[in-house]
Image: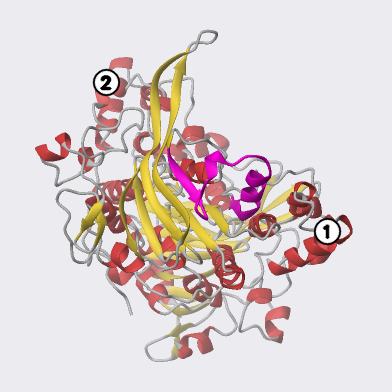
Amino acid sequence: MSEPILEVTDLVKHFPVQVGVLFKRTVGHVRAVDGVSFSLARGETLGVVGESGCGKSTLAQVLMRLERATSGSVTFEGRDIFSLRGQELRRLRRDVQIVLQDPYTSLNPRMTVGDLVGEPYEIHADVAPRGERRRRVQELLELVGLNPEHINRYPHQFSGGQRQRIGIARALALRPKVIICDEPVSALDVSVQAQVMNLLGELQTRFDLSYVFIAHDLSVVRHLSTRVAVMYLGKIVEIGTDDQIYEHPTHPYTQALLSAVPLPDPEQRGRREVIRLTGDVPSPVDPPSGCRFRTRCWKAQDLCAQEEPPLVDRLGHPSACHFAEERPRIVPTSA
Amino acid sequence: MSTVYDGESGEFVPPQEIAAAQDESLLQVLGLQVEFRTRDGVAKVLNGVSYHVNAGETLAVLGESGSGKSVTAQAIMGILDTPPAFVTGGSVTFKGEELLTASAERRRMVRGEGIAMIFQDALSALNPVFTVGFQIAEQLRLRRGMGKAQARAAAIELLEQVRIPHAAGRFGDYPHQFSGGMRQRVMIAMALALDPEVLIADEPTTALDVTVQAQIMDLLAEIQRERAMGLVLITHDLGVVAEVADRIAVMYAGRIVESGGAREIYRRPGHPYTVALLESLPRLDLKGQQLNTIKGLPPSLTDIPPGCPFHPRCRLAQDICRRQVPEPVPLDAARSSACHFTGELMDRV
């Protein structure tokens, strides 16, 4: 593996919880991201999965430097992104782009497609001189499978899938190296979702892009990712290759998550192990002591409440469980 | 349809079995047509939808956004907004009684007691200014004539049935004090209050996380078994359908394009749209899978293509598909497909 393009070390992002109107008091912290480390290699896709509230979208915002980290570091091509200023920061904005979940609210309804996709050139004028912008935008539209003649249309004239393509074209405008995809297909119908996933795959090969692909849908993540990180309450609980996570998961949360995904095959009904978690995810304001998953875990022992299991190599890949072990028949392999 | 194609013998036989199957159905929709009259024109949202559900059975209505699956449910319940929506044809019968021509009073009686419905977004389906206990007990007091204490006890029992922890203590909580999964349970409790015979669940787990979705689906399945309810599960999730459905009706552009037993349809889909849906789904259990996409987009309902509505996106489309709307062809007693080339398609697989 080549040297990582993005390196995240012990990243922490806490949001203060405040009460009072005039004299605000901080009464606690939402520990949205609480000590996350991973690296992203050039041309690779790292999938990040987890349920709502696990901190995956906050992670995206911090990686984009839309939010500052509470502590920890993120380096892009070896440079700490939080110490960048001026010209250097502008350069980072060019290299790291984001595709957002909701194609309905992430596009300004009063701007034409041409303005939306071409807007990055207003700030990064050196990428495309003024006279050339229209042509560049049309090229981008064609690249993502939209009709370049629709450059003067408004977002409401497009369907959800087409709007997501506009969002992708906009992210590509400055020729980025890394794209953070925050639930890019979860608002789309199955038939359209496949089109957008295939498009993301093609663009990656063509432009040698690296993706951080954030999603709650484990099947979508498996399809696009080379490596996968599973998050729970602000922490990565297990990380590994596609095979390691999907075929040989060792963390109970990963196992439960995988076993809860309904398989589109009625023949598998009742033939796979079903692990049903009880209760909901605890509040990130006051996470459980020790292992955060212990309150919903069937393996929990006293040790789990006392000592937080570190994310270290167990049975071949990193897993943050004191009692990590493989379990058969979580995901039956079909023909 | 005077004869039925029998897949076993390859011959056409009289459709007595189909008629027999439909006689006993609890809820039956036949040729339902609904249009939305808007300033931008008339949208033909339902163009002859037929399905039925029997007691103790789960029918999954599968389709993408805009296919008309929720509108069908709203028409059954009589909760369409008119205008813009108008029912222009067809029938909905519940235990043999026609609902579309029934009085408003009669329909109100059927709602809740005969057919109840739960919705995708529990937060907006529940009233934020009343406690959940009040909202469940309200129906019992109005419709069952229970006193306050009696309704309260019954409501708490319902909350226990849907496994809300400390039900008695949560009776006085407001919807926003519950998590997403718990709110969905509250809505299920509300729907069960009058002991309905049919439950329509419109995307009940779409807004939920996968581990919570599994809990809710288990709960629905269990309740259905216990009460022998007919369940109409409206969803776009092919995984959920595969796990719970007995039968499936696949909708596209306001029509049922294919219906039949769940196992049979997944094993050997009889309509090109169903085939394409299954091929475009990323699967957890398949590695390095090639996703086949469906080209283009679902049609605009104000401008449905002539002939088969799926033809512009179909790999098998021929001239006849552009000219003639394919009628549902029975494939066996329980299956039908609305495609001119079903035979060829199924022989290929």
Type of the residue with mark 1: Arg
Instruction: Residue A211 in the image: state x and y as whole percent.
Output: 51, 59
Chain of the residue displaying label 1: A
Q: Which residue is mark 1?
A: A133
Q: What's the CA distance linking mark 1 and mark 2?
A: 63 Å
Question: Which residue is pictured at 69% across the width and 57% down the height?
Answer: A174
Type of the residue with mark 2: Gly
Count how many numbered circles sit on residues in the image.
2
CB atoms of marks 1 and 2 within 8 Å: no
The correct choice, above or below, for A291 with respect to A127 in the image is above
Instruction: Residue B339 in the image: state x and y as whole percent.
Output: 58, 79
> Is residue B63 visible from the viewing direction of this image?
no
> Is residue B89 visible from the viewing direction of this image?
yes
Q: Which residue is mark 2?
A: B169
Please, what secondary structure does the residue beneath circle 1 have?
A: helix
User: In the rendered structure, which segment of residues is drawn in magenta?
Assistant: A72-99
Chain of the residue displaying label 2: B
Q: Is residue B130 magenta?
A: no
Question: Which residue is pictured at 41% across the width and 86% down the height?
Answer: B7
Towards the viewer: B41 or A82: A82
Towards the viewer: A191 or A168: A168
Question: Which residue is pictured at 57% across the width and 85% down the height?
Answer: B341
Please, what secondary structure does the residue beneath circle 2 have?
A: helix
Give the class, few, some or many, for how many residues have Cα within 10 Å of label 1's Cα (few <14, many ≥20): many
The correct choice, above or below, for B37 with respect to A159 in the image is above
